[in-house]
Amino acid sequence: MKALRKFLDKKKPLFQKGGKFAKLQSSFEAFETFLYVPNTTSHTGTHIKDAIDLKRTMSVVVLALIPALLFGIYNTGYQHFLSLGQSAEFMDICIYGLIKILPIIVVSYVVGLGIEFAFAQMRGHQVNEGFLVSGMLIPLIMPVGAPLWMVAVSTAFAVVIGKEVFGGTGMNIWNPALVARAFFFFAYPSKMSGDVVWIAEKADSFSGATPLAHAATLVDATGEAATSIYTQHLSNAWDMFVGFIPGSIGETSTIAILIGAVILIASGIGSWKIMASVFVGGYTMGAIFNLVGANAYMELIPAWQHLIMGGFAFGAVFMATDPVSAAQTARGKIIYGFLIGFLAVLIRVMNAGFPEAMMLAILLMNTFAPLIDHYVVQGNIKRRLKRVKVNA
């Protein structure tokens, strides 16, 4: 590492003002600060001294995503061989999954970081670090059958329209990864729905429908038909919890996602208040539907099962907790998270056209997060003013 540090110090003058490659200063600083904590310090004012910076924070989030990624790689291969009715060794399953998923990750980072570097060069600013996380989140919320050029277009849209037009990292009002998924969903709906897209090269006779897709069929089903659908496709909650089901690459395993949640909470980066309130909100709406029981979907799906279906857990842990687009106040985080979970279950049950409603719920509450914080702050001000004793 000392040799690398000496090499960077030797080349650094070339990228500073007056150097041969001064125009590429922001690109050089991006690589340098990714490898090493910046050695600059503040000279005025009072500051908290800490070794962690935004790049290190983003790196912890990427680390928390690794369990979901690894399981996604395995599940991709597992679902493929299962659909073909073939047994395969552990390594064969993992290698197949890696071959399918790695190109999606590469495309996401190459396109996203390429645009980030281009904007930094044009503005003469430092490269934003936020895409270190977004570049991993985007592949994990995509179906394994997503064409690479569609992933590239969706990523470009998310970076440019979802973030850079607002000023870059820290200024965006929506989660960039969810903007990419929303664009993909509405621009290429046939590649985000149906039985084919969730399993790589599956057998034609094998159903690749997700649990949410099966659950949506309960809306119009009655009697024995509804019971048969639930028993055949939705009663095995353990597989849903572990993740041996079709779905987006990183969203199927609740266990892997919860491991990531522990890392985020232990490091102080993820808000446990948002995570917990999302699950409480989802369970509350599910319980209300169980009480109403207007159709088989409301009646047969237990409230707790909504929490392990689709991208609910992934959204609660990694999407809703985005520190930029989420609520910032303590009470606002609870309200914000509760409404996300509540709306996600409401939309998925009431509108079969949007079974994966977590995306829409988070984007909607991203929009209202500043308003929630505003009223929380105003409420605090009013309560404190009432405690003020005015001297006569």
Image (tube, rainbow, N blue to C red):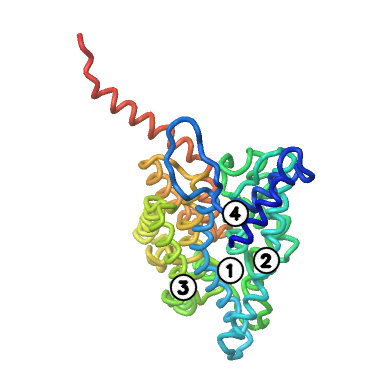
- At 41% from the left and 51% from the top, the residue drawn is 271
Q: Secondary structure at mark 2?
A: helix
Q: Residue furthest bottom?
A: 87
Q: Nearer the viewer, residue 210 or 183?
A: 183
Tag count in the figure?
4
- At 38% from the left and 32% from the top, the residue drawn is 377
In this rendering, is residue 214 above or below 351? below
Asked whether residue 220 is in view, the answer is no
Of labels 1 and 2, earlier in sequence is: 2
Q: Amino acid at mark 4?
A: Phe
Of labels 2 and 4, earlier in sequence is: 4
- Residue 391, image x and y in percent? 21, 12
- At 48% from the left and 30% from the top, the residue drawn is 44
Q: Amino acid at mark 2?
A: Ile
Q: Amino acid at mark 3?
A: Met
Q: Which residue, given by chain and number where applicable, does mark 4 sit on? A: 34
CA gap, disc 1 and disc 2: 10 Å
Q: Secondary structure at mark 1?
A: loop
